[in-house]
Image: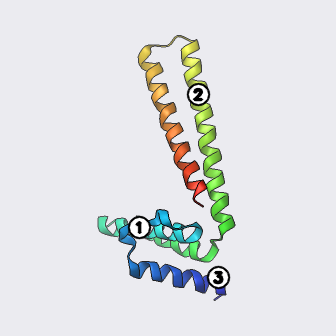
Amino acid sequence: MTIKTKILSIVFFAFSIIGFSQSNCKDLKSCERKLCELSTKLAAAKKAGNKNQIKGVEDAIIQTKKNCTTKTVNTDLDKKVKDKQQKVKERTADLNEAIKDKESKEKIDKKRKKLNEAKAELNKALAAQKTK
């Protein structure tokens, strides 16, 4: 076991003793935050009795312990932001086209709502990226 793995294991178990149920992962950074969020998901899956989700989250925790570095977390967050930016761009184009084609008010409103949702997702991703 490498030193990094040992440290991550110690941190993981220390946080699990403190209690992930507090869901205070926002105060953590990088790999510790990712492990905290996964542990919260695991607790929810166990509470719901969803065996497939439990297995998936447990596998994700193992992989995170094994492979997580600040660089991989940053890369994941950067990719998420780029994906959300692309979604906003597509939704903006859809809305502009609907306005240009003089589609019904309902369709334009629906596309505007989708654009606003995409912008909210982008803002959330940007906020997560700032806290890395």
Q: Residues within 10 Å of mark 3 (few under 14, many from 20)?
A: some
Q: Compared with residue 18, is residue 101 higher up or lower down, i.e. above or below?
A: above
Cα–Cα gap, marks 1 and 2: 34 Å
Q: Residue at x 49, y 33 (%)?
A: 116
Cα–Cα gap, marks 3 and 1: 22 Å
Q: Nearer the viewer, residue 81 or 60?
A: 81
Q: Position of residue 68 (x, y in %)?
A: 62, 71
Cα–Cα gap, marks 3 and 2: 44 Å
Q: Residues within 10 Å of mark 1 (few under 14, many from 20)?
A: many
Q: What is the secondary structure assignment of the residue under circle 1?
A: helix
Q: Compared with residue 108, is residue 49 higher up or lower down, i.e. above or below?
A: below
- Location of mark 3 (residue): 4
Q: Position of residue 9 (x, y in %)?
A: 54, 83
Which kind of residue does numbered mark 1 sit on? Thr
Q: Nearer the viewer, residue 63 or 78?
A: 78
Q: How many marks?
A: 3
Which kind of residue does numbered mark 3 sit on? Lys
Q: Quadrant of the N terminus?
A: bottom right
Q: Residues within 10 Å of mark 2 (few under 14, many from 20)?
A: some
Q: Quadrant of the C terminus?
A: bottom right
- Location of mark 2 (residue): 92
Disc number placed over residue 40 in the picture, else none: 1
Q: Residue at x 65, y 52 (%)?
A: 79
First-in-chain label (1 vs 2): 1
* Quarter holding residue 21: bottom left
